[in-house]
Structure formats: C-alpha cells, structure tokens
Amino acid sequence: MKGSTFGYILGLIVGIPLFALGVNHFFFQGNNATYIEVNTYLQNSKIETFNVDKWVGEGSEQYIVALQRGSNSAFLEWFTFYEPRYKKYFNLYMFTYLEDNQQGSQRTEIAGYFDRNIKFTASVNQEQLDNSKYGSKENPVPVWPRDLLEYDGEEKSVTQDSKINNQIKRFHVKPEINAIFIQQYLSRFMPKDEYKAMFKK
C-alpha cells in the first residue's frame, strides 16, 4: 500500500510536470521564435505616429500560452484603421494577460473607448510595410503600440494627475514588454510560410 501511495505521489510530482513540458514543447511552440529573430524583427522596425478618428474593425483571439500554474491563456486584441499616407490598412495589436499587472487590459480599454480621436506612436516592421501582401482590410500591416500622444483631442497636461497623463502612463509599452509581444506574435500568429520567408532566407 505504501508503495502504491509513493508511486502516486511520485507521479504527481514528476509525471504531471513532464506531461506539461511535453505538451508545451509539441503543441504550444508554433514558430518558436528565438531572441535573435525577435531582435531582427525589431531592428528592422521604425516608430511611426498615427492619428485615428475611428477604427474600421476590431477583434480578439484567446489562445493557450502554456500549461503552467496560474493563468494559462492570453488574448491577442486588434484594432484596424486606415492610414491615408500609405493607402493601407493597419492592425494595432495588443496582448492582454502577458504582463504581471492589468496594464494590457487597461491599454485595450483606452484604445477601444475613445470618442473623438486618438494619436499614438507605434512600431512597424519595414519588411511587412513594404510587402504588397500586407495592407488590405483582410490582411492589415501589424503595428505595435508604444506611447499615447493624444486622447479625445487632449494632449499631455502640465497637471501631474490629469486624466490624459494617467491614460498616457497606462498605455505606454516598455521595450521589454514589446519584445514579449513580438515573440508571441511571431511564434503563435505569423503564418509559417511568412515566418520562413522572413527569417529562414
């Protein structure tokens, strides 16, 4: 009896983590983007300023990050807009539940509920921007949020605790968080053929 109990406990301690490790390796890796590929993507990106008066579409997709303790899932959220300068559609991509706090959810809330216009900086990959396959309403150019410049027509205030200053602080994406977002996008959401074309040349 003691032996079977020991085996059961050993199975819980060793077996379940090994099972989760195996499932994560074979089912949740996707393209399995490395630090080098994330860095290459970021180095070939530039910061652009966008001024949007309305989104032409929005959506979200829930996915499993990994089998682990705590939260296993996250959301990729997007807001679609048209940019006349490039005559292309863009998707402002954001992830929620990848940061320790609730800033991801706050960021999407800010983006989703403006009344007049929103002005922000975002990172855009030059290769995707120049690629003719990107820019249609069905396949917009991905852009990644950086900083909020204007919200509902209000710019940064000299008053420290003003509404716009609080929105700016909640919207800001740190470089290390941006790298996590890019890694998740490349690994889980970029089509394999496009991934290979960009990184396996």
Image (cartoon, rainbow, N blue to C red):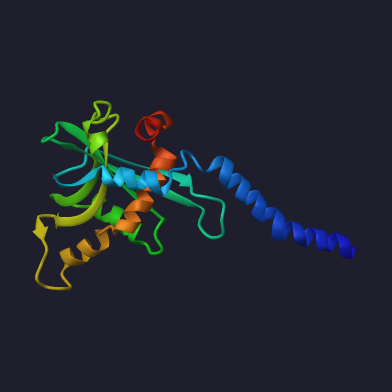
Asked where in the image residue 169 lies, by quadrant, the reply is: bottom left
Image point (24%, 26%), residue name: 132
Report whether 27 appears left or right of 102: right
Q: Position of residue 176 (x, y in %)?
A: 34, 58
Report whether 133 appears left or right of 194: left
Q: Vertically, is 149 above or below 132? A: below
Image point (20%, 45%), residue name: 46
Q: Position of residue 126 (x, y in %)?
A: 23, 38
Report how many numbered discs are placed on residues in the image.
0
Q: Position of residue 13 (x, y in %)?
A: 70, 61
Q: Position of residue 144 (x, y in %)?
A: 27, 47
Quick one: quadrant of the N terminus?
Answer: bottom right
Identify the residue at the far front of this view.
201
Q: Vertically, is 140 above or below 60? A: above
> Is residue 76 among what the camera can see?
no
Asked where in the image residue 103 lies, by quadrant, the reply is: bottom left
Q: Vertically, is 138 above or below 156? A: above
Report whether 1 appears left or right of 80: right
Identify the residue at the far bottom of this view.
160
> Is residue 2 among what the camera can see?
yes
Identify the residue at the far top of this view.
132
Image point (88%, 65%), residue name: 2
Q: Vertically, is 43 above or below 135? A: below
